[in-house]
Image (cartoon, helix red, strand yellow):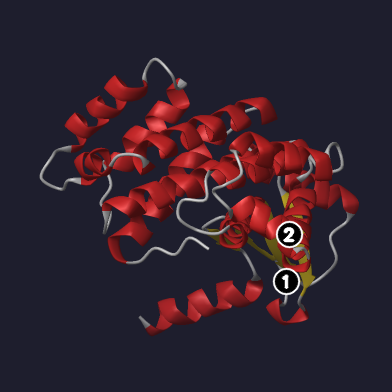
């Protein structure tokens, strides 16, 4: 799990909002392309302490750091990835390493978004969990994927042999990346971190709806269409029937809450009168 605190936590929250905008309206292939580019940038950051420090130095202005990003990656990464990297270095990070941690989170979420567009996000989440169980039950596999003695090619071939076409394309891409990008962790912790990031993306495209009466199919379809248009990604509804709200509807998705319930309106009215 990628855990950030202080300024890094706030910066990651802002950066995830920027990712939402970058992914808005994209195809699954385009989302995967952003994920691959972010992983490419992550390799560069992980391989250079000097680069991480230069990109997180609070004494340097954001424009100069964004220019450094452009100089380094303009010829190899797409424009949206460059823009995301530029946004990331304008934010404050508690340590240089946490910038790299945040980019890893975004890279996984971008691939999870591709799975969501392909209607396979729940499948990817389940397959990562299954792989985690497989690692626990098979110490030989765990050792083979953790040891530095095996070449990356051998590890990738091992994954292909075990899974082949049995898992979704997004799952296989994430597992392949996990094997080549342990970043000082073992394979179990890396897959756990990826699972957490996939869950975080799922939570951003699942809308929790509270209503006092069941919604008709037409009402659900209309609500899904409206939220999908606003978010720019396919949205799924989790509907909770709650008679205590008296009437109206409450919707929670991503970092937003739309509360149009009668109980909330009464509460607001009481506060206005008291004020």
Front position in the image: 229 or 272: 229
* Rendering coords of residue 221 (x, y %): 82, 46
Residue found at the far bottom of this picture: 274
Q: Quadrant of residue 4?
A: bottom left
User: Crowding near pointer 1: few (<14 within 10 Å), some, many (20+)?
Assistant: some
Q: Secondary structure at mark 1?
A: loop
Distance from disc 1 to disc 2, alpha carbons, whole Å, reads 57 Å
* Rendering coords of residue 94 (x, y %): 26, 59
Residue found at the far front of this picture: 149
Front position in the image: 139 or 22: 139
Can residue 120 be seen in this snapshot? Answer: yes
Q: Quadrant of the C terminus?
A: bottom left
In terms of sequence position, does the residue under pointer 1 or pointer 2 come before the other? Answer: 2
Tell me if label 1 and label 2 are in contact, CB under 8 Å: no
Front position in the image: 149 or 8: 149
Q: Is residue 162 above or below residue 194?
A: above
At 17% from the left edge and 45% from the top edge, which residue is drawn?
A: 57
At 64% from the left edge and 69% from the top edge, which residue is drawn?
A: 261
Q: Is residue 239 above or below residue 166?
A: below
- Circle 1 or circle 2, nearest the eye: 2
Q: Which of the labelled discs sits on residue 247, or is there none?
A: 1
Q: Secondary structure at mark 2?
A: helix
Q: Quadrant of residue 192?
A: bottom right
Q: Which of the labelled discs sits on residue 140, or is there none?
A: 2
The count of marks equals 2
At 38% from the left edge and 35% from the top edge, which residue is drawn?
A: 44
- Asked if residue 113 lies left or right of residue 140, the reply is left
At 22% from the left edge and 40% from the top edge, which residue is drawn?
A: 50
């Amino acid at each position: 799990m990628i855990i950030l605190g202080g300024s890094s936590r706030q910066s990651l929250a802002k950066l995830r909002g920027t990712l939402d905008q970058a992914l808005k309206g994209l195809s699954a292939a385009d989302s995967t392309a952003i994920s691959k580019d972010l992983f490419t940038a992550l390799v560069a950051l992980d391989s250079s302490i000097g680069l991480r420090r230069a990109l997180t130095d609070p004494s340097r202005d954001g424009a100069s750091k964004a220019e450094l990003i452009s100089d380094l990656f303009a010829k190899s990464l797409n424009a949206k990835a460059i823009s995301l990297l530029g946004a990331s270095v304008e934010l404050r990070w508690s340590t240089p390493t946490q910038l790299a941690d945040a980019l890893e989170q975004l890279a996984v979420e971008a691939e999870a978004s591709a799975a969501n567009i392909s209607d396979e996000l729940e499948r990817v989440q389940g397959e990562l969990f299954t792989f985690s169980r497989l690692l626990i039950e098979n110490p030989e596999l765990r050792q083979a994927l953790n040891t530095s003695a095996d070449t990356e090619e051998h590890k990738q071939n091992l994954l292909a042999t075990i899974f082949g076409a049995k898992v979704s394309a997004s799952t296989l891409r994430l597992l392949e990346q996990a094997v080549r990008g342990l970043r000082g962790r073992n394979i179990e912790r890396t897959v756990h971190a990826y699972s957490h990031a996939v869950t975080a993306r799922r939570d951003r495209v699942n809308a929790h709806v509270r209503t006092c009466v069941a919604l008709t199919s037409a009402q659900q379809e209309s609500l899904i269409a409206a939220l999908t248009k606003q978010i720019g990604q396919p949205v799924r509804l989790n509907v909770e029937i709650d008679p205590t709200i008296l009437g109206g509807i409450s919707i929670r998705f991503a970092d937003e809450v739309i509360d149009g319930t009668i109980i909330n309106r009464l509460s607001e009215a009481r506060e206005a009168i008291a004020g």
